Every structure is written in C-alpha cells, then in structure tokens.
Image (cartoon, rainbow, N blue to C red):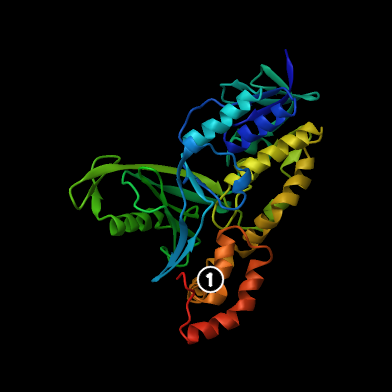
Amino acid sequence: MEIVDLAVIGGGPAGSSAARESSERGLSTLLFDHAYPRRKACGGGLPVKGIEWMDAPDDAIECRMTSISFAYGGTKLKVPVKKGKMVRRDDWDYYLFRRAVEAGTTHVKEKVRQLERDGDTWLINGKHRSRYLIGADGVNGFTRRHFLGPIPREHLFAASGYYLGLKPTENEVEFILGAIPGEEGYLWIFPKADHYNIGYCYNAGTPGMKEALEKLLHERWPGEFTNSGRYKLASGEEVDCIRFGSAIPSYNDPKLFDVPVSGKGWVLAGDAAGHVNPIHGEGLNHAVLGGRLAAQAVYEGDPTLFEQYWREHYAHDMYRAAKTKHRIYRPFFMRIGFALGRTPAVFGLLSTLTRGEYEGKATRAFYLRAPLAALQVLFGMRHRDV
C-alpha cells in the first residue's frame, strides 16, 4: 500500500487551500471529499480584511460591495467600501478545489468513516495510508469529533436563511441588530448577482430566529410563502425562496482557543479548528489562511507548529472577539454605540474597522472617543456620510 505524505479530509476553503499549499511544496497529497461540486449554505461574502490574499476568479464573483451598513432600532450606519466581494460559494469552493488538483493533489471521492493510527502513519478507510493528516471537514465533521470531540451547542451559531429570487438594486451588505431583543446575533441581507441571500446568525437555540427573519422578509418585500421554495410578492409576482441552514463555531469562552488543535501527525483547520470570529461568525479568511499554515507546519515535519503560526496571524482577533462578544451585543451598548456612531468622533473609527484598516484596541479607542462623541451628539453634529 502506497504511503503519501499528507491526507486532507474535507475539500472546502480550508482543505483545498491546505492541499494546494502542500502540493506546491512538493508533498504527495490526497484530498478526501465525496460531494464535489456542491452548494454551500453560506452568505458568500469575502471579507474586506485579508481579501488581498484570498484567491477568487472573476467568474466566481457575483458582485463587489459598495457599502456595508449596520442597523439598530431606527438608526442605520452605512460605510462605503471598495474591496469587499460577494462570491458564489459553489463556484469559489470548486475553483479552490481545482487549483489544488492542478498543483498535484489527488482527489479521493470518498467519505472518511474510519481513521486509525498505525505506527507512524494514518490508515484511512482501511485502504489509504498517510504520514500526516489535516482535518478540514467542518464544524463537527468526522475529524473534529475524532480528535477533540464535537463543539458544544452553547458555542455554536445557528445560521439559516433564504435565497430570494429578486435582483438587487444596490450592492449594499446589511446587518440588522436587535431584531430579537437581548439576544446575541443579527439578521443579514447580502446582494448577489441575481438574488438576495438573507438570513439569521444567532447563538444556537435562541428562540424566535426564524420568526424574526420572516418578519424582515415580509417588511422589506411584502408577500407570502406559497409552494415549497416559492414566495409570492404583493405585486403578484412569484419568485424562488429557497431555504438553507448550517452551524458555525462561535466560542463564548476565550479559553476554548487555548485548546490545541494539533497533535502527533495531525492538525485541524478552518471550522473544524473552531477558527471563526465569535462576534459575527466570519471564518472564510481564517479557513484559507489556516489551511495554508497547517500545510506549512506539516511540510516542516511538525503539525504542532500550527499552534504557533495561527496565533501569530489571527489569534488576537479570536480572543478579543470571544472576550467582547457578550458586551457588544448588550442592548445598552448597542443604544449608546449607535447613538455615538453617527458622530464624526466615532463614525471614522467604525469605518476603519469595517474596512479592516484599524490597528489597535478598538474597544479602548471607542471609550476614549466617547466623551467627545457625546458632546457632538449634544450639539447635533453628525458625520458627513451619515
């Protein structure tokens, strides 16, 4: 039985990026994924931060963001952006997958159901052998459960929504906060080429998520559900309204990031590692970069080096988000934040954060600017873009 250098389990952004990186470094690589091509239940937004190194071909880009807005109560803060992209996840994922194969990766169209440590190698499904293994098969996929156990439900976001078959009139990405009072999460509206992607992202088990989303849908586009997967507008036009859903890691305790996600001969990346921002559930940039860093550690002969690499690159974002998540979503903070967010003192900070340009401690910067912003509220001063 042939022994390859690396087996990657899961062909999403993390797995395909890891396989491509390892193949380009000269390692013999197997990529296990049984379901290509597929449509991924995801908003498909490539974040502004880190987008320079996120490889996306023009034919996978549905539109380019013109703005990102945040709404709470009757206040809306709209930030112009230039770098954000919306992609079709099926096309983008398949592109990353093909790049891995083009680099020399061998695709194994099998679902991994069995994994054993046999000496210095891994025996996969009883018939494939590999010296190292990267697990990138999702939030509670086989490798996550095998090495660390499932991520507890209290540390997951529930994300679900609809593909609504209406052509967007503006490429504005919207986040609606406070739709379920006192709960941590948000509703979203993402523009795509020929439809809207709308959904909710809240702590798993939050009551009223589906109802809050449907209320937004009916308010924005009055109408009613008809047959399965269809929606009839008040005008009489009937369009597709296809449901999707998934779970996303969202650690509510920063100590969970202390747990190693690698060991002798193995490493986890992407959602399998829990590397998703706990505040808003964005993980595509960490998946792509994390997969590459995992492959680098394997190439250097020690998968546990991944602990050093990911902490150097994005651990600060993860820990900070986990520590501040509960404070940020508090209604008091939201009311104050949005009231001050319209002022010149704070709107500029929000803009640089949204564009991924801010360097420093954002929470501290907010509180330092708050007194000046309060004065500007008192005198009715607003930022020119509000």
Dot 1 amino acid type: Phe
Q: Quadrant of the N terminus?
A: top right
Residue 149 appears in the rendering: no
Residue ID for mark 1: 347
Q: Nearer the viewer, residue 152 or 191?
A: 191
Q: Residues within 10 Å of mark 1 (few under 14, many from 20)?
A: many
Q: Is residue 341 above or below residue 68?
A: below
Give whichever of 79, 259 is nearer the camera.
Answer: 79
The residue located at (41%, 42%) in the rendering is 244
Q: Is residue 62 left or right of residue 33?
A: left
Q: Depth check: give the residue in front, 101 or 308.
A: 101
SS at circle 1: helix
How many numbered circles does the render carry?
Answer: 1
Q: Residue at x 57, y 58 (%)?
A: 355
Q: Position of residue 187 (x, y in %)?
A: 43, 57
Using the image, determine if residue 53 lies above or below residue 344.
above
**Image quarter in which the C terminus is found:** bottom left
Whole-percent x and y of residue 161?
40, 48
The residue at the far left in this view is: 236
User: How far across and down, in percent of the image, does residue 315 sit?
Assistant: 70, 53
Q: Is residue 341 left or right of residue 254?
A: left
Where residue 345 sits, quadrant-wise, is bottom right
Q: Is residue 19 left or right of residue 222?
A: right
Residue 148 placement (x, y as % from top left): 68, 41
The residue lying at 63 percent from left, 41 percent from top is 288
Residue 351 seen anywhere in this rendered image of the structure: yes
